[in-house]
Image (cartoon, helix red, strand yellow):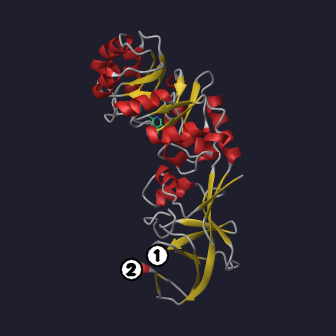
Amino acid sequence: MLAHARISLDALRHNLSRVRQLADGARVMSVIKANAYGHGLPETAEALGGSDAFAVANIDEASRLRSHFPDKKIVILQGVISQEALSLACKLNLDVVIHHEQQLLLLQQAKLSEALSVWLKVDTGMHRLGLPAEQLAAAIDRLQGCSNELNISLMSHFANADDQSDPLTEQQFGMFEQLTGQYNYSKSIANSAGILAKQDYHLDWVRPGIMLYGVNPFTDGMPSELQLQPVMTLTATIIAIQHFSKGDRIGYGGTWTCPEDMPVAVIAIGYGDGYPRHAQSGTPVLINGTPCPLVGRVSMDMICVDIRQAASARVGDPVVLWGEGLPIEVVAEHSNTIAYELLCKITGRVQREYS
Ligand SMILES: *Cc1c(COP(=O)(O)O)cnc(C)c1O
């Protein structure tokens, strides 16, 4: 009675075509780090095979991906921090991001066997990775003068594009334009929220992540508003129907009290599967199409649900935790987190099925 994550490959393809439609003319670097946001490699990557490139976080993810896709352009978003990793990246024809002086030195000191594609990353206000703005021009000079053959592109990253009222996004974009305008290299700044926020941000390469998985990247809003289709539907099974009395307290800590005599369904999914422990009482699940509220704390292997509105529910019935008919955004909000985290945290116990 395992929990299942159904992954719709059609929805993935639809969302990629939505990116193409929005960012007409830009090339698409599909971000499939963290096991494709929990959706699983290589199936997800296969469905997104129409992308111009893939991006992952580190060299381990990149080399695994390379074994499945011998010819695809693959970008390592964190770049590398050792000479061995740099040689390996070069040998496997992986693009590296250069975001720090140390990586520049590594590249200048390396004797690479082949040409290498590098993405020089400048910090325009995210303040995580990236060269300080005032070092960008000198860094480009150094790359141009490097004895290794390099294909150079330029990038930056938005800090808060998911909040459309934050002027920082436009400021970051303005700064990026100003810093890079004089160079003829390919440029990239837009994540999903940036792609959806403004056409100007698309530049030469867009870098969609979360929207490919059918999630609305903005702090409020549902995927349907953006014509995105949810990719993952998480389901589990009812393993018991209980009848409790008025005043009975449910589960660990007894945090929820029955207001009347009532039926409660026990469903075989919990934080051991990646269902969020912080989902509050009232978080909806779907039983035979009817939204029913979670009651009490989430356990490792089980949750309890008030089924007063779904009296026909039976042991063995499937329950949707998120996905088709129940946007993951709603569950994230009730759990005080974001859909990104919910998707990434699906554990190995959940069986993925692709259709
Ligand atoms: C993860 C990531 C993305 C994708 O972000 P989404 O918000 O999921 O679209 C794009 N660029 C970089 C550098 C990233 O790390």
Residue 305, image x, y percentages: 56, 75
Q: Nearer the viewer, residue 218 or 147?
A: 147
The three-letter amino acid code for the residue at tag 1 is Gly
Residue 66: image x %, image y %? 56, 36
Number of residues whose C-alpha sits closer than 10 Å to that of mark 1, classed few (under 14), some (14–19) or many (20 or more): many
Contact between labelled residues 2 and 1, with CB atoms less than 8 Å apart: yes
Q: Residue at x 57, y 41 (%)?
A: 211
- Relative to 290, does residue 171 appear above or below in the rendering? above
What's the CA distance linking mark 1 and mark 2?
8 Å
Q: Any mark on residue 306, and which?
A: none
Q: Of 164 and 110, which appears nearest the observer?
A: 110
Q: Tell me if residue 184 comes above or below residue 350 in the rendering.
A: above
Residue type marked 2: Gly
Q: Which residue is outermost to the bottom? A: 245
Left or right side of 77 for 245: right
Give whichever of 337, 354 is nearer the camera: 354
Q: Which residue is mark 1?
A: 296
Pointer 2: residues within 10 angstroms few (<14), some, or many (20+)?
few
Residue drawn 44% across the image and 23% down it: 118
Is residue 179 at least partly visible in the picture?
yes
Mark 1 or 2, nearer chain start: 2
Quadrant assignment, res 27 = top right
Asked which secondary structure carries label 1, the reply is: loop
From the image, tell me which residue sits under label 2: 253
